[in-house]
Amino acid sequence: MATVMQRIVKPKTQAAKRALDVRSPKLEENDKVAMFIKGGHTSETITQVLKELYLLKKPNAITFKRKNIMRPFDDQSSIEFFSQKNDSSLFLFGSHSKKRPNNLVLGRLYDHHVLDMVELGVVHFRSMQDFPTEKIAMGTKPCLVFEGEAFEQDHEHRRLKSLLIDFFRGVKANNVRLQGLEHVLQFTAIDGKVMVMSYKVLLKKSGSRTPRVELTEIGPALDLEVRRTRLASDDLYKKACKKPKKGKPRKVKNVKTDVFGAKMGRVHMERQDFSKLQTRKMKGLKRQAPSNKENAKKAKTESSEPTAEES
Amino acid sequence: MVALFPLKSVIIIIIIIMATVEDVLESVTQSQASKYKTIEVQKDIEPQLDLGNLLTVDQNPLDLKKLRGDKEAYLKSQARDNTQLLFNAIWKLPTERVEEAICVKLPETTTVLPREKPIPKAKLQTKWEQYALLKGIQKRKKGRMVWDEEAKDWRPRWGYKRANDETKDWVIEVPGNADPNEDQFEKRMKAKKERVAKNELQRLRNIARGTKSKVPGVGLTPTEKPSKEEVGLALHLAKKSTASLGKFTEKLPKEKEAKHVGKKRKFEPAIGDFKKEKEQQLNIINVMENKKPKMDITKAVNRVMTEVDQEASSDDRRKRAGKVKNRRGPPRKKGSGGFGKKGKAGKGKGAKGMGGKGKGMGGKGKGKGKGR
C-alpha cells in the first residue's frame, strides 16, 4: 500500500497512523538505523568492538542484548525479519569461531532485503579505553577520510567504501557548527586490509581565518581484513540508488515577517481560567476566610495584651 | 652647544635608526609567521571532497616504507593533511549565525548512496477525484464549528458533542407513508450501517482499482454478516469458477444441489410471435447488406462529450493562475453546450430507439436524423 490512506485495514488511532507514517517509504528518508547483533559464540574482542562501534553510532543504533544463532551468509531471513521489526537498514553482526575468528559482518538492506554484506576479520583491536585522552560527545557527525588506491580501483573495495560511508556518516545535516567538527574517522586500504582510526580534532590558530588542524587519537583502532563478500547485482544496486524527482517544497505555515523584518508566529493556547492560575505564592497577600480572620485577630490581641501588661 | 652637531651626522644617525627600526619590524613579523604552522597541504593528486558528507577520498599511493616503520604516526599525519584540506574547503563556505554559534551551510552530497526503502508510488486518484478534476470541481474546506439551533451555540461539525446529533433524538416522527409497526430508531441505525458499509466498499474498490486487481461484483463483496442467500451465492460462484465451469467440483456429503441460483437466462419461445420473428430475420439481412458501419450513437456521443469536457477543464486550469476557491466548474462554452444539448437529445432518442432487438435499426435511423 502506498500511503496510510491506501491501506486495506486503516489504523484506528492517531498514534498508530503516525507510527506507520514514520516507517513508510518517503521522498526524503529518515537517517539509517544500525543493528548490532551478537552471534552464537563471541569473543571478548568482538563484544568490545560491537560495544564501541555502537557508541559511535548512537543514537541511530540498536544493540541486541541476547546472542542470536544465525549465519548471515547462509540465511538472510533472520536479518530481514529484524530489519522489518526494528525499521533499520544497516547491521553489524559479530561472531567468533575457530574457522572465522573475530568475525564481523557489515551489511545494509534495501526494502528490508539484504543489499550488500561484507565479512571483515578483526586482526588487531585497540579499545577506546587504551587511549587516555578526552573523548567526544555522542552523536557528533564525523569527518570521513578514505585513503588507498584500492578504494577506487577494486570493485569490492568500492562497495565497501560506500557501505562504510553509509554506516558512519551520521545524521544528514544542512548546517554544521564550525566548532562542532570534532571527530575524524580514517579508513586506509592496504593490501586486502582496512585500517580504521578515530581522532579528535583540535583547532589551532593559524595566520588566517582557517584554523590549523591537529589530531589526537581517541577512539577504537581496528585492523580489519576483508574476508567474504556478498554484494548486490549492479541492476539491483542501481535501482536502490535511484533518486526521486523532487516534490514541491512544503509551505511553512504560521510564520510571517513584519515590516521591520522580525519573524512572527501565532501561539495557540487553550482556554485558561485566570482566577485559578498557578502563580507564585505570597503568603501575606493570601485572602483569609472571615472566621479565620477573627481568630487571627483574637490571637494577635491576646498575644499583645500580656506583653502590654508586662511592660 | 646643541647646534654644534653637524647636519650631515644628524641625517646619518636618523637613517641608521630607521634602518634598525625596519630590521626590528621584519624580525617581529617573521617570528609571528613562524609562530603559526601553515595550513597549506601539498598533494600529488587532489583528494576528492564531498562536503555534504564531510568526506575526503585520497587516491595518492601510500608510502609503504613509512607504513612498515611507524604506522600510526604516518597514518595520523596523512589523516591530518586530508582533514586540513577538508577544513580549508569548509571554511570557504558561506557562514551564518544561528543562536550564538557560527554555522556553515553544507552543500548537497555528491556521493551516490542507496536508499533505505523504494521510492513511494504516486497516490492513485479515486473515482470521485477523477470526476472532480474533469468537471473542475474545487474542494471547499468546511469549518470545524457549526451553529446548533437547538443549543444556540457553536458545536463541532463531527465527533464528541456534535451539532445536530441524530442519535440523541428521543422522539422520531413516523412519516405518513411508513408502516406504523416499524421501529424508526432501528431504521435509522440500519441506514447508518448501510452508509458506512457502502463507504467502505467504495474505498476498497478504489484501492482495488489502484492495484489493478479485479473488483468482484456486488454479490461477492465482503460484508460483516452475510445473509444466507449471500453465502449461497458466493458458494455457487466459487464452485462454478473452475476451468470446466463447475462440472467436476465435488459436493459435500450432505450438500443439496442449489436450484435457482445465479442469473436466469431468458429465451424467447421457439414458436411464438411470427411477426416478430419475421422482423428480426429481415433486420439481420438489412444489417448485413448495410454499407455504412454500425454506429453506437450513445457511445459516440458520450465519447465526444467527455473529450470536450476534458478540453474545457484543461483550458480553464491553464487560464486560472491563482487559486479560486468558490468555483463550481468551467464556464460552459456555447459550442459545447449546443452540441451537448443536441447530443443529449440524440442520445435520448437513440436510447429509446435502441430498446429491444427488433427496433434497433429503426431507432438508429431516428437518432441519426435528429442528431444532424
Image (tube, rainbow, N blue to C red):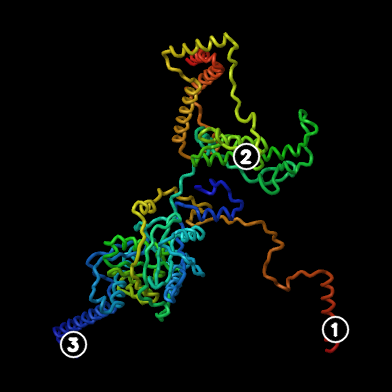
The tag on residue A305 is: 1
The kind of residue tagged 2 is Leu
Determine the residue positioned at 76% across, 28% down. Answer: B177
Image quadrant containing the C terminus of chain A: bottom right
Quick one: SS at disc 2? loop
Pointer 2: what residue? Answer: B252
Please tell me if label 2 and label 3 are on a single chain.
yes
Depth check: A262 or B307 in front?
Answer: B307
Depth check: B207 or B31 in front?
Answer: B207
Pointer 3: what residue? Answer: B3
Q: Position of residue A77 (x, y in %)?
A: 46, 58
Depth check: A166 or B233 in front?
Answer: B233
The kind of residue tagged 1 is Glu
The CA distance from mark 2 to mark 3 is 142 Å
Q: Looking at the rendering, which quadrant does residue A106 occupy?
A: bottom left
Q: Are marks 1 and 2 in contact (CB under 8 Å)?
A: no
Depth check: B364 or B60 in front?
Answer: B364
The kind of residue tagged 3 is Ala
